[in-house]
Every structure is written in C-alpha cells, then in structure tokens.
Image: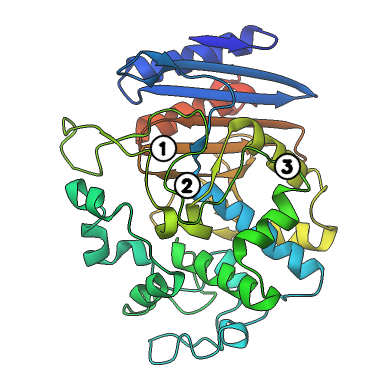
Amino acid sequence: MATTGNPGTDHEAVQLVLDGAVASGATPGIVTEVWKGGSRWFASAGKADIGTGRERAPQELFRIGSAAKAFTAVTTLKLVGEGVLGLDDTVEKWLPGLLDGSPYDGGKITLRQLLNQTSGIYNFTMDPEFFATGQGEAWYERRLKVFTPEELVRIALRHPPCNAPGEAFRYSNTQYYLAAMMVERATGESYGDVLDRLILRPLDLTRTSLPTTQTVIPGPHPVHYSRLYAEDPAARLYDASESNESTAWSAGGMISSTGDLLTFFSALFSGRILNPAQMAEMFTTVSTDGSGWLPNTRYGLGVWVEQSGVPVWGNGGADYGTFTLVMGSRDGTHMVAAHVNTDFSPQAYEAFLAILDIEFSRAEHSG
C-alpha cells in the first residue's frame, strides 16, 4: 500500500477499495490518482511485479486501451475547428473507393457517426477468425505481427452492418481506424504525427505516446498480467507487456500514465483544447442502451458519461493485461484516474465505480 498527497477521510475510504480489489484477487495491483481543486493525491495497492514483489508506483507507464479514443476524437475535432475536416464529411469523401464492394455505403457514413459509434460498421476485433488468434498461445504468436489499418478495416468489411448509419450505438474499433485514416488523408501526415503536433506536445504529455512498430513500453511500468481471455479462471498468467499495437492503433494503442491522463482530460473538459462549437459536439451524446456495452452510460464523441450517480465524464479501456478508467466533473476541476495491471474484469470495474462514488459523493455512498 502506498499513498502520497494530503490524506483525509475520503482518501482512507478509497484506499480501502484499492486494498479490497487486490485482496479479492481481482488484480495483482491497482493505482488511483485524484486531482481536485489544484491538489493531487495518489494511492496504490498490490504489486507491479508479483515475481519480484515490486509495488505499484506513481508515474508508471501502461497501455491505456480505448481511452485512446478520446485522443483520436479530440485530434479530429481540432481539425474540424481549423476547417480541415467537417463532422458531416463522409468516408467516401476522404477515402474514396475504400468501402466499394462491401455491404457499406461510404457516401452515407459520416465522421460524426464514426466518432459517436453509430455508423454500424462491424468491429474487426470480433471477426471469429481474428478473435481466435487473440486468445491463449495464438495471441503470443500474433502479438508482434504488424497489421496495416487497411488490412484490419477490410476484415470488418466482410461482415454486414450492425445497423443503418446513425441509427444506433454499436461499439467498434473499426470506426476509430477510419476516423484516423480520414485525418491522415486530410492532413497528408501520419495520424501519430498529427496527434503529437496538436495534442501531446502542446500539453507537454511527455509520458504519453502512440507506438508504431515499437513493442516495448518505454519506461518503468507494471507487468501487464493476462490470461489471454481463456475462460478458465485458473488459466496461466502471461506477461503481456510486450506487443505490437497495430491491432489497436487509434482505437486503443496508446501508452500513458495516470498523471498525463489527468492533465489531458482536465485540459479538455476545462475548454483549453477545443473551441466551444467542438466542445458542444463532443458532449452531445447518444444512448448505449441495448448495445451490450457498459450500463448507465451515454456516448459522445470519444468521451462518455457514467450516470449511475452524479454524472461523471471521461473514457477508459482495456487491452491485454491492462484496464484504465479516467472520469471526472464536466468542467475538469475534479478528475480521477485508475489503473489495474490485468485485463478488464467486472470486479475491477466495480472497484473503479466505488472510487467514483466516494470521490463524487454519489448516491450509493452519500449516506
């Protein structure tokens, strides 16, 4: 157990949640960092490395999974604000012919629908053949292979639409690949270069990166423990820290830290990145009901709101051996980041929600 900052009653309650998550077996290690009123508080429980006994610590790097979607959406919205892209631009306008011969009409799918996940485009990660290579020993054989965005999009295009464009929310990484591909075509730069130019450098996010072919996490990090989605809860734990993230890219391939994530989301929500018109678009949400996604949520452009108590905004994501959540007040003045060094689990998500309940005095814990 480790804490830094100004301890208090609420912080003690958060520490109990962290200790409980580790004691329950939900995770080898867990950290949380809280920013409120200009002050910072960090706490941890469990191990970064169960072999050596090394504890979790501040400023560790980790793969942030789909929290990267917020960076992609904000990069895109910056370009919208500059007049380089339009939210009503179609896939066909910037990627002509890409969807030809598929069950999709690229002239009817807009950038806005990609970002709010209502385009209906199938999630390539759920393709049965591709999914099979992402489990157990098969993933270990695939984890260093490089895929191009076009290869992965074409896997999705083999499948029929989940819904008509704009009709319903269906979570799909393919949509964020297409959005980043539109960014590349509109700017003539790689998506990573645009992200760095518009977001990472201006905010001095020195611990945040989008790897291309680099497979190692470039700094101190917890071991990313994964059972590689085996159904047996007693299956072997693998070290999944090293991998090629071309299968996640703009939809989930970034590396960051709790501190950098709080810097980014606080700057975003406080209006220091986007202009008011793009902020309004980002916070315009669609229902996720019936989609099989997280309950009590609505999805905007790269951010979502969790509504089981006092509404909190942010994003989160999972990858092999890592699960992150960053949520806070809509004005960015009170933000919470949490991370566990294992795959998504209901128990870890419940721990994250319990931390939010404490920090924001939400209904379940307000008495």
CB under 8 Å between callouts 3 and 2? no
Q: Amino acid at mark 3?
A: Arg
Within 10 Å of disc 2 (Cα), the crowding (few <14, some 14-19, many 20+) is many
Q: Earlier in the sequence, mark 3 or mark 2?
A: 2
Q: Are marks 2 and 1 in contact (CB under 8 Å)?
A: yes
Q: Amino acid at mark 2?
A: Gly
Tell me, yes or no, if residue 361 can be seen here.
no
Judged from the image, the secondary structure of the residue bearing numbered disc 3 is loop
Residue placed under numbered mark 1 in the picture: 322
Q: Determine which quarter of the picture holds residue 46.
A: top left
Please state the horizontal and vertical placement of residue 56, each as a whole percent of the image.
47, 19
Residue 191 seen in the current view? yes
Please rate how many residues cluster around mark 1, counting C-alpha atoms within 10 Å: few if below 14, some from 14 to 19, many from 20: many
Residue 265 position in % (x across, y down): 69, 42
Which residue is disc 3 drawn over?
Answer: 330
Number of the front mark, 3 or 1: 1
Disc tally is 3
In the picture of the structure, the residue carrying the numbered disc 2 is 65
Left or right side of 188 for 294: left
